[in-house]
Amino acid sequence: MSWICAEKNDIDMYVDTSTLFAYYIAEQKSATVERIIGSTETTYVSSLTDVEFYSALKKRNRIGQISVEDVQLTHEMYKFHRSENLFEYIELEDLDFKSAELLLKNTTTPLRTLDAIHLGIAKNHLLALFTFDNVLLKAAIELDIQTVNYSG
């Protein structure tokens, strides 16, 4: 198994949208995300994360969980945090997509396209993956991609 403990602060990790969302919108796992991001050397996001995060905010508005103002303020806060280097930014490269395709060939876990790309980014950039998505986590472990152990 490729778990690493995020309590030490010398790791570099890539956060997917499930984790990023819990950082900005209060939910059950928000305190865990804050603790781990706060104790990690470097936290990475990508251009894929940007789009998925904004889409998730808009979806929460459509289903009545957050207001239009909350969408705008949260998205602006995320962009501000990026500009202040709270997160390191990865622009997607062709190699990230090729890595995702190769990972899809080598897993038995049914993955959505964007999840495969998240895995490809983590693998290609040698980053531990921090996710709350159980399918993505299962695939990462199967593919020997380091993951962040967020339990207690």
Image (tube, rainbow, N blue to C red):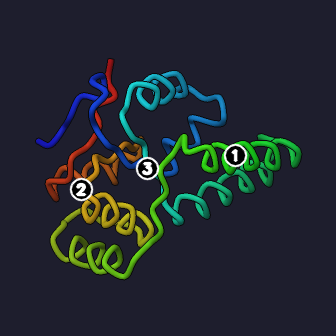
Residue type, numbered disc 3: Tyr
Left/right of residue 126 with respect to residue 78 in the rendered view: left
Left/right of residue 21 with respect to residue 65 in the rendered view: left
Left/right of residue 99 with respect to residue 35 in the rendered view: left
- How many numbered callouts? 3
Q: Quadrant of residue 8?
A: top left
Q: Which residue is mark 3?
A: 44
Name which of mark 3 and mark 2 comes first in the sequence: 3
Q: Quadrant of residue 13?
A: top left
Estimate how packed mark 2 is, as few (under 14), some (14 to 19) or many (20 or more) residues with alpha carbons within 10 Å: some
Q: Which residue is mark 2?
A: 126
Secondary structure category for the residue under label 2: loop
Q: Of all residues shown, which one is farthest toward the top?
A: 152
Residue type, numbered disc 1: Phe
Q: Position of residue 34 (x, y in %)?
A: 51, 26
Name which of mark 1 and mark 3 comes first in the sequence: 3
- Residue at position x 30%, y 22% from top? 7
Q: Which mark is residue 80?
A: 1
